[in-house]
Image (spheres, rainbow, N blue to C red):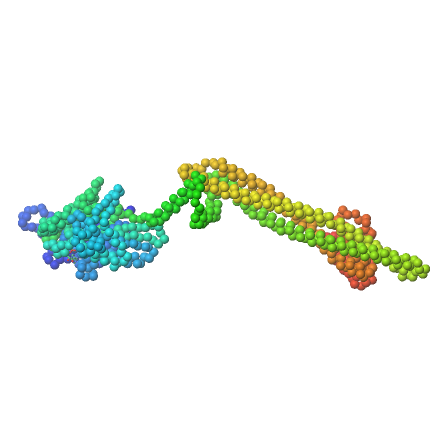
Amino acid sequence: MVKQGIQIFARVKPTKKPTADFNLDCDEQGASLNFVLPRDLADGFVNNKREHFKFRFQKVFGPNASQEEVFEDIAKPVAENVLAGYNGTIFAYGQTGSGKTFTITGGAEHYNERGIIPRTLSYLYQHFSKNSAIIYTTHISYLEIYNEAGYDLLNPQHEASRLEDLPRVSIMEDPDQNIHLKNLSLQQSANEEEALNLLFLGDTNRMIAETPMNQASTRSHCIFTIHLRSKEVGSATVRCSKLHLVDLAGSERVGKSGVGGQILTEAKYINLSLHYLEQVIIALSEKDRSHIPYRNSMMTSVLRDSLGGNCMTTMISTVSVETRNVAESISTCRFAQRVALIKNDASLNEEVDPALVILRLKREIQILKEQLALVTGEQRSDELTPEELQLLEEQVNLYLDSSDCEVARVREKECPLNASAVGSSNGLEEEDRSSQADLQKLQEMLKHRDNEISILVNMLKREKKKLQDVTFQAAKNTLQTDEVIETDQSNASTPPQGSKTRTRVADLSTAQQEVFELFLRDHEDRPTIENNKAVLQERFIEAKKLGEQVNQNRIKVNELKMQLKKRRKQIAAQGIMENKMEPEPDPLEEKILNQIEDEKKIYKMSSSRLKELKTQIEHLQHLHEKMKFLKQQHTDILPHDHRGENTGDAQNHQMFTRRMSLTDEAADRQERRPREHYSLSSKDQRAILSPEHSSSSIPLTGDKQTDADIQAFIRARHSLLNSSGRVPDH
Ligand SMILES: Nc1ncnc2c1ncn2[C@@H]1O[C@H](COP(=O)(O)OP(=O)(O)OP(=O)(O)O)[C@@H](O)[C@H]1O
């Protein structure tokens, strides 16, 4: 709020006639207007009439001051305040013919004679066009107060008609003592041209008459008002201000005006209303005056804000320095001095856009209705519209995204126990996510192992079949050999070649037996593999169950969390409704929190068991890897064994040797197996297979290719044993 006295200015009308003695003094504080009245000899030599008069103003405009100068110094600052959102008033006061209309509206002859109204309009519209960031709306009203009656000068239907035909304006007052003018039209003007047209229309309708002192005397008070509404783009705040530009009727005394008839009546009314104006001014300038008689006249009622109210007001005293008008001029200056004592309280007229306020209130009502329904448990009977559904979805997402931390913080302040529960449930979520990933990994691993096991079982089946074939072939060979022996025994002369053959047959028979034993032993591995497979399946089933359990836990915890949020919302809404500052402990909320804790315990147990299972499954996987490697070795050898079947004794022996090495390794792997059934002692085998052992000591077949194979096998075996840290005994 700005506390400001009414600014007073004086303007001296130029004159061609001889003038009274007056001068203007200017200093830093303003200017003063000095009058020197000549001593009237008719009053006698001895009289105490005052001869010197000095009046101070903000500024005094001499006879040569231009309209532009007056506008710049008086109207422009007021217009700027109006643009900033303050109310403003400029009123001209002076006797008839002193230049009030010339100053406010301007002369009719030259463009340069444009007065304050057209110049202010021009200034405002120029400002609007320069500031595109602010939206301005301008309305104009033009009120004439003639003989204490108000008329709307801007009614387009009554253009150039008689004053009586103009709409009558009446004053209404609301309980807050705000004045409203009924029937006064507000005409919107989008640009300067439209505003000037309105000014011209109003001026045409004004009551003008010829008086002895002014050929075109305005016989009424006229108030031209610019209503300004400004709003920054994107802002909800609106500024509304008014600028009253007032041209008062002449303030001369009736006796001096030299009029009669209707003009005399007018003069009386003018004098009366100016008298009331003076009374208001005196009342306002006096301290501790409780009652200000604004209601005495229409003019003071309308200008109520401008005089001692929410307005920045400026008065222009128009004076004539012609000798015959000096007394009136002094009277005008005296009046101005009193006006200068009045202090106004101008405040920024800012308000929130009513349309936006309505929108906001509607939203608030909707939210409150929803909260009420939530608290009272009232159900909506109608279905939600798609817009409502979308809005709800957005709100829920927004709440879930942003409110967790906020809620946690708020709850932490309210109850540390709750905060820890929320925090722990967040931790639970993280654990849950990592366990889910573990579970998935384990499931994949189990699937993989399962496939491997079935491949191994198939391989074992194939091997079994092949060994059966080999056994069958060996039995067949034995039968044939027996036949040969029998034939040899029946011959008296047995060549040395025959005894050699028998020895070979005996060797072959032993090799076949070893192969058979190997088959049996390999066959014995099957239960181990089957057992491992069964254990793996068991673990898999358990892991699957636990996975489901963990999932159930997670769903349950989420449900409980939703319940918790909903409950807290209800409690908060209830608190708002009942205006409770502190939230009371809620048993239901406690119950939900306990349930969350229980679920958390179950979850932790399941989670740790899943970890155990993971270790076990990894161990089993390791065993299977080992078995897979051994079986792979076995499978690689088998094709050579088959070659042995076809190529005779040497290949059979090679097969035997390889089988021996395999058996040896299998024996080491499976310590539980008895070694007695080997046809060669373990020591003998090692001696044979040791790399240090000279190649000549290894029983060779005589076939170059086969012998090379045997040597390569021995080297490979040795390097394998070395890499696994098992160096054979020497
Ligand atoms: N400063 C000025 N410069 C030139 N001419 C002026 C000046 N002031 C007034 N006049 C002229 O004096 C005449 C009377 O002025 P004006 O009509 O403005 O007086 P007024 O105070 O409005 O009188 P009324 O109260 O009777 O309406 C007009 O012809 C106007 O052009």
User: x and y percent of residue 686 in the render?
Assistant: 79, 53
Q: On the rendered structure, is 113 left or right of 535? A: left
Q: Quadrant of ligand 1?
A: bottom left
**Of residues 445 and 239, which is closer to you in this image?**
445
Residue occupying image coordinates x 50% and y 37%: 590
**Of residues 269 and 34, which is closer to you in this image?**
269
Q: On the rendered structure, is 486 left or right of 389? A: right
Is residue 53 visible in this depiction of the protein? no
User: x and y percent of residue 598 in the render?
Assistant: 56, 39
Q: How many marks?
A: 0
To which quarter of the image does residue 485 belong? bottom right
Above or below for 285 versus 74 = above
User: x and y percent of residue 566 in the render?
Assistant: 47, 42
Residue occupying image coordinates x 60% and y 42%: 605
Residue at far bottom of view: 704
**Of residues 713 and 15, which is closer to you in this image?**
713
Q: On the rendered structure, is 370 left or right of 538? A: left
Residue occupying image coordinates x 78% and y 51%: 520
Above or below for 120 versus 47 = below
**Of residues 22 and 380, which is closer to you in this image?**
380
Q: On the rendered structure, is 329 left or right of 606? A: left
Residue occupying image coordinates x 78% and y 52%: 519
Residue at far right of view: 492
User: x and y percent of residue 44 in the render?
Assistant: 5, 48
Is residue 480 visible in this depiction of the protein? yes
